[in-house]
Structure formats: C-alpha cells, structure tokens
Amino acid sequence: MSDGRDERDRPLRVAHLITRLIVGGAQENTLHTVEDEHRLHGDDVSLITGPGIGPEGTLEPRARAGGFPLHILPKFGRSIHPLHDWNSTRQLTRLLRDIRPDVVHTHSSKAGIIGRYVAERLRIPAVHTVHGASFHYGQHPLAYRTYVMAERWAARRTARFICVADAMTDDYVAAGIAPREQFVTIYSGFDVEPFVSPPRPREDVRRELGLEPHHVVIGKVARLFHLKGHEFVLQAAVPVIRANPDVRFVFVGDGLRREEFEDWIARHGLTEHFRFTGLVPPTQVPELIHAMDVVVHTSQWEGLARGLPQGLIAGKPVVSYDVGGAREVVIPGQTGYLLPRDSVDELVEALLELSGNADLRTRLGQTGRERFTEQFRHQYMTSRIREVYQQVLEATHPNRRTPTGEPRTSPGAPRTPGEPRA
C-alpha cells in the first residue's frame, strides 16, 4: 500500500567515505551533507573515515554529536601505506556488507579510490565528489600521471561524479577521466546565515584583533601551507602599505609555514600591519570575515575556495587568482578582481584600488551577496545531491521501491540484470 509519499522523498541508505575529518572545505561539505540527509530527509546515513588528525584541527567531535553512525578506520590515513591501506580496505568491505547502503558516496582522493573499488566488489553504485582534482598544478610529473591513471581506473567504477565547480569537470574531462555527461556541478554549500548576519559586532572583533576603525583590513582564510599563495600577499603588502599605511592584513588559519611568514614580515618591518589568528573553529570564521573589508585568495591550486563565496555572502569584495572554480564567483567589475595566477603587480593594483575606495568595496560586495547567497546554502546542496542518488538508483533499477526495510539482495550475491546493487 502506498503511503502517499513521492518515491523521491523516501528515505535512502547512504554510506559516506572520506579520508580524514580535519577542518577543511571538503570535510565541512561532507559533514553538512551527512547531517542534512540524517536530520532533514530522514535518511539512514553512515559516515566512515580515518582519524581526524592534523595541524588543521578536527571535526570528529561535531560528527560524533550528529546522531548518525560514525565509523573510524584506525589506520586509514592520507599517506599511502600498503599494509594499512589493505587492512582498511578489508575493514571497509566488512562495514559496507553490514550497512548494505543503496549508494556509497566517496570524498577526497584516497577514500575515492578505495571506496569505489570496494563498492564495485559489493555491487553498490558509487557517487564521487571532486572537491579538488587529485592531479594538479605544482605536482611532480610522475605523481600527476599516477593520479590521472588512478582516477581513470576509479571512474570505471563510478556511477556519477559531483564537482564543486565547473572547472573541476573541465579538468577531469580534459584528462580523459570520464565523459562530460557523467558529471554534474553542485557548489559546496555551508551555513550562510552567520555570513549574512554577523554573530558578533564587527567592531568588537576588530578591537580584539588590535584593529582601529580607520584601518582597511585585507583578509585571507586558508591553511598556512604550500600552494595556498600567502607569499604573494606578502610580496604585494610592501607596496600596498607604502601607498596606504592604514592597510592591515589578517591571516586566518595555521600551518607549517607560519614561522617562516612571521620571520619574513619582521625582516621587512611590517609586523604591526599583520595579524595571525592561528587555528580557529569554523564557527568563528564568519565573524572574522565580517571584520575584514576585502577578502583575498591567492592559492595556486584549488577546487573552489570556500572563502570566496563566504566573503561575498558577507558583503565583501574578493580578489583571487584565476585557478579552479574562482572565475565562477569572482566576476570582474561585479564581485571582485580575477587575476592571472602568481601575478604580484596586478594584485598590488587591485588591493590599492579597493583599499582606497569604500564605495567600490560596498558595490562589489553587495552584488556578490545578492548573486550567491541562495546558491551556497547547504540545504540546497544536499537536496541536489539526493537528486543525483535518485537518478543513479533509477538508472540501476527503474522499478526500485522503498530502499530501507525492504527485502533485497545481500552484497556479494549474484544479481540479475536490472536488479538493484545492494
């Protein structure tokens, strides 16, 4: 008997796999998806990951409080380790046999390779989100070619790719990973409300950072790691501060290069012009962005840096190098400045124009807020991801009924053509 619910509204059983739950864009994206599927859609959802260990901080406490099953594979780490990876693969196989999901949704490079391999063995359809290409600018040529080959191999075990930017699809199609029709773009959503309305007064946050009302604050939100491009901001800071001494720079985040950057700043006599927040919880990022006047992101490689739409939704103009999906939100003349990668002269010019023109900052930031607030709501992201699941399941078995609680084939058992992978 039908309960009157549309088939697409019925709960799904989904297993998500990500390599580790550190504080980062891909991890926050994954947690929002899992939380929404569990709380908003009533899905039977599980999250499988390695230990959330790293200088970036951990999201494990948030996941443990989510109300859904969290499974930690103790030896599942980012670095390649044949023995540990083999043991983790066996553990994952046992877990998925127990969970019996309708769909396996993988995130990040290593989890994507192993997860799709196991899903194929168990005849479960796999969806993979590309948060950032595993092969990218700045890699050793051998590593680049190895990742391309691995992604091509995994693509044959992928029902659908979700990319966080059109640029990711372009990269994967150009590298021959899979045909374009296998991809869909769904922007990486987040909680937009704190960026629309600051959780704390801007003046209070600036005061705590030692910033005066007349200071023009240029901020960057990113780990202090290689390829994140902080060195280009440092190089641009010298002429920018010389021309406008009221400019202050705020680096939000921590990492291996902090001491190196602080030494460079001290040698150039710019210490009073820089603030380092260190590692902060994601919930503190909105108030820090609201304390800024301009958001800059000079990464040399990125999927779509969350700091860009976050800055725009907070009403701030953005300046970014033209990498990854930046051009999809940084629109010259409308929301900010899109610059050639690694350029310093153009960066100086953009920062000087913005630091000296409050009306321009307001206009660009307001346009960004109007254009992108709804598009980056995590609830919208999750609803679109579930549509992808439904398309995959309908393609696998057009007559599929209620996914949970119904009799179905056990993982590993023979199935007839058109029977759902389970």
Image (cartoon, grey):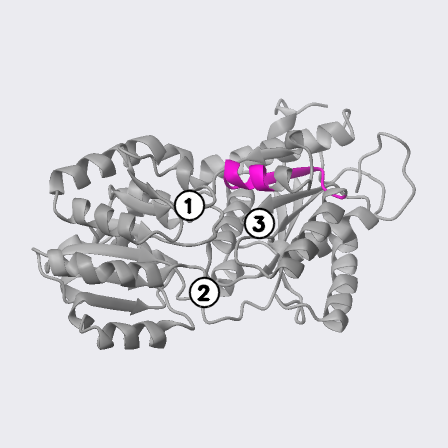
Name the kind of residue labelled 1 in the image.
Phe
Q: Nearer the viewer, residue 177 or 13?
A: 177
SS class, disc 3: loop
**How crowded is the residue under tag 1: few (<14 C-alpha within 10 Å), some, or many (20+)?**
many
Q: Name the residue under label 2.
A: 226
Discs 1/3, front:
3
Rendered-image quadrant of the C terminus:
top right
- Using the image, tell me which numbered label, if any, was put on residue 133: 3
Name the kind of residue labelled 2 in the image.
His
N-terminal of the pair, mark 3 or mark 2, is 3
The residue that appears at 59% across and 39% down in the rendered structure is 162
Residue 228, placed above or below residue 315: below
Q: How many dots with numbers?
A: 3
Q: Nearer the viewer, residue 375 or 134?
A: 134
For the magenta stretch, what is the residue range? Answer: 157-171
Rendered-image quadrant of the N terminus:
top right
Q: Mark 1 points at which residue?
A: 190
Q: How far apart are marks 3 and 2 (CA)?
A: 16 Å
